[in-house]
C-alpha cells in the first residue's frame, strides 16, 4: 500500500505543529507531515488527521443499480486496481471554534484490540493520539465527539479500556449522534458489533446525546442530518464570520462522486443520497465554503464548484502540498 501525505507544511498552523513534532517520538511510522493538515478560517481551526489507510472494493453503482464500468471507474480513480479496489485514507477531523473543541469521527482504537481491520489491510499512521500530543490537546479538552454515522471506520476510537472497564475516550465530551442512526444499531442492526461495543459504554456513562435533524452545537458549529449513506448519516458545517467549512463525512467517498452524483457504493440509498448531495452542493457553492470528506486524500481540503449543469470537486492546493490523488 502506497504511503500518501496529507498536504501539511504550507500554512503557519502546519509549520507550528511540525516544529513541535521534532521533539516528539512515536512508535508508528510516518512523520507529522504525512498525517496532519490544518487550515484556519477566521476564529475556526480545522485539522484533518489521517488515521490510516484501508483497501476497499466499493462496488460502485449507478442510480439504476447497474455497476459503473470498471474502465470508466479507473479513469476517474487512477489508484483503483483491476478489481476496482483502492487504498483510501480514513480521516478524523478536529474542529476548534471559540470554546468548542470537537472531534468528528474518531476512526480507530488501539491496534491491540480485536476488530475487522486486518481484512481491510489497515496501515496506521502515528494517528490521532500523536496528533493530539503535537497540538497540545489532552482528551479532557474535547467538548464534543460528533459521529456522522455508525460504520466501524468512523467510530472504533470512541472508547478506551481503563482499569478493565470500557469507557468514553474523551471523558468530558458529549457524544452527538442522530437518534435514527443509533436506535437500529442498539437493536440488532450492528453487523460488526462495533456500535454496541462503543456506544453502549458511552450511553452507560451518561455522555450520549441523541439528536433529531439539524442541531447547532455552538458558535456556528452545526450537525446536519443528510441521509443516504445510512438513515441517520450527518455532516458537519461551521459558519465563522465570513468563512464557512463543511465536513461532508461519507456523503461522498471519492472526489469523482461530486461530478457523478448518481454513483455510490453498493448499499447506499442512492435516491436519498442524491437528494442530500444536491442540497449540500448548493449550500457549499453559495457559501464558497472550504470542504473535506471522510476519505479525502492529499491535500485533504477542496471546494465544490459549478460545472455545466452539475458540480465538480476542486482540490485546494497550496505551496508545499502533495498532489491530489
Image (cartoon, rainbow, N blue to C red):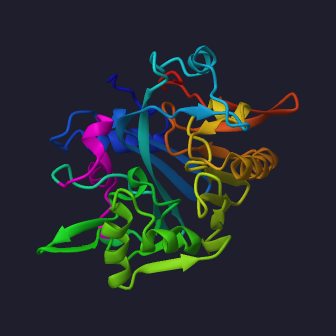
Q: In this view, does 230 lie to the left or right of 182?
A: right
Q: Which residue sits at x=38%, y=80%?
A: 203
Examine the structure image and report whether residue 186 is included in the region drawn in magenta: no
Q: Can residue 67 be seen in this view?
A: yes
Examine the structure image and report whether residue 131 is included in the region drawn in magenta: yes
Q: Can residue 122 be seen in this view?
A: no
Which is more toward the observer, 275 or 147?
275
Q: Is residue 20 left or right of residue 270?
A: left
Residue 14 image offset from top left, x and y in percent: 43, 40
Which is more toward the observer, 114 or 67?
67
Q: In which quadrant will I find the N terminus?
A: top left
Q: Which residue sits at x=19%, y=39%?
A: 28
Vertical placement of residue 234 versus 200, above or below = above
Q: Which residue sits at x=16%, y=72%?
A: 162
Name the image quarter holding residue 6.
top left
Q: In this view, does 54 lie to the left or right of 82?
A: left
Vertical placement of residue 88 versus 198, above or below = above
Residue 225 image offset from top left, x and y in percent: 66, 64
The magenta-colored residue range is 113-139
Residue 130 image offset from top left, x and y in percent: 26, 49
Name the image quarter holding residue 224.
bottom right
Q: In this view, does 125 lie to the left or right of 234?
A: left
- The extreme right residue here reads 309
Residue 200 image offset from top left, x and y in percent: 35, 76
Which is more toward the observer, 188 or 233?
188
Q: Which residue sits at x=77%, y=51%?
A: 275
Amino acid at each position: 500500500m502506497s504511503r500518501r501525505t496529507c498536504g501539511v507544511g504550507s500554512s503557519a498552523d502546519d509549520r507550528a505543529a511540525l516544529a513541535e513534532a521534532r521533539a516528539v517520538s512515536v512508535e508508528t511510522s510516518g512523520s507529522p507531515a504525512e498525517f496532519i493538515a490544518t487550515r484556519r478560517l477566521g476564529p475556526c481551526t480545522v485539522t484533518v488527521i489521517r488515521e490510516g489507510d484501508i483497501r476497499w472494493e466499493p462496488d460502485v453503482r449507478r442510480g439504476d443499480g447497474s455497476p459503473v464500468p470498471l474502465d470508466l471507474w479507473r479513469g476517474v480513480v487512477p489508484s483503483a486496481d483491476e478489481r476496482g479496489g483502492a487504498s483510501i485514507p480514513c480521516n478524523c477531523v478536529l474542529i476548534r471554534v471559540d470554546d468548542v473543541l470537537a472531534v468528528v469521527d474518531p476512526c480507530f482504537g488501539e491496534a491491540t484490540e480485536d476488530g475487522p481491520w486486518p481484512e481491510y489491510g489497515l496501515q496506521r499512521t502515528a494517528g490521532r493520539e500523536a496528533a493530539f500530543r503535537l497540538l497540545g490537546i489532552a482528551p479532557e479538552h474535547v467538548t464534543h465527539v460528533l459521529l456522522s454515522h455508525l460504520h466501524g471506520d468512523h467510530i472504533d476510537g470512541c472508547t478506551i479500556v481503563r482499569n478493565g472497564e470500557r469507557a468514553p475516550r474523551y471523558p468530558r465530551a458529549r457524544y452527538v449522534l442522530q437518534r435514527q442512526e443509533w436506535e437500529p444499531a442498539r437493536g440488532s442492526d450492528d453487523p460488526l458489533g462495533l456500535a454496541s461495543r462503543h456506544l453502549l459504554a458511552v450511553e452507560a456513562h451518561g455522555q450520549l446525546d441523541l439528536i433529531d435533524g439539524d442541531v447547532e452545537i455552538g458558535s456556528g458549529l452545526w450537525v446536519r442530518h443528510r441521509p443516504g449513506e445510512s438513515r441517520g448519516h450527518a455532516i458537519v458545517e461551521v459558519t465563522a464570520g465570513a468563512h464557512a467549512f463543511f465536513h461532508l463525512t461519507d456523503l461522498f467517498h471519492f472526489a469523482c462522486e461530486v461530478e457523478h452524483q448518481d454513483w455510490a457504493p453498493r448499499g447506499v440509498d442512492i435516491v436519498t443520497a442524491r437528494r442530500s448531495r444536491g442540497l449540500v452542493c448548493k449550500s457549499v457553492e453559495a457559501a464558497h465554503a472550504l470542504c473535506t470528506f471522510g476519505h479525502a486524500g492529499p491535500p485533504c481540503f477542496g471546494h465544490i464548484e459549478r460545472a455545466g449543469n452539475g458540480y465538480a470537486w476542486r482540490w485546494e492546493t497550496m505551496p508545499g502540498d502533495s498532489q491530489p490523488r
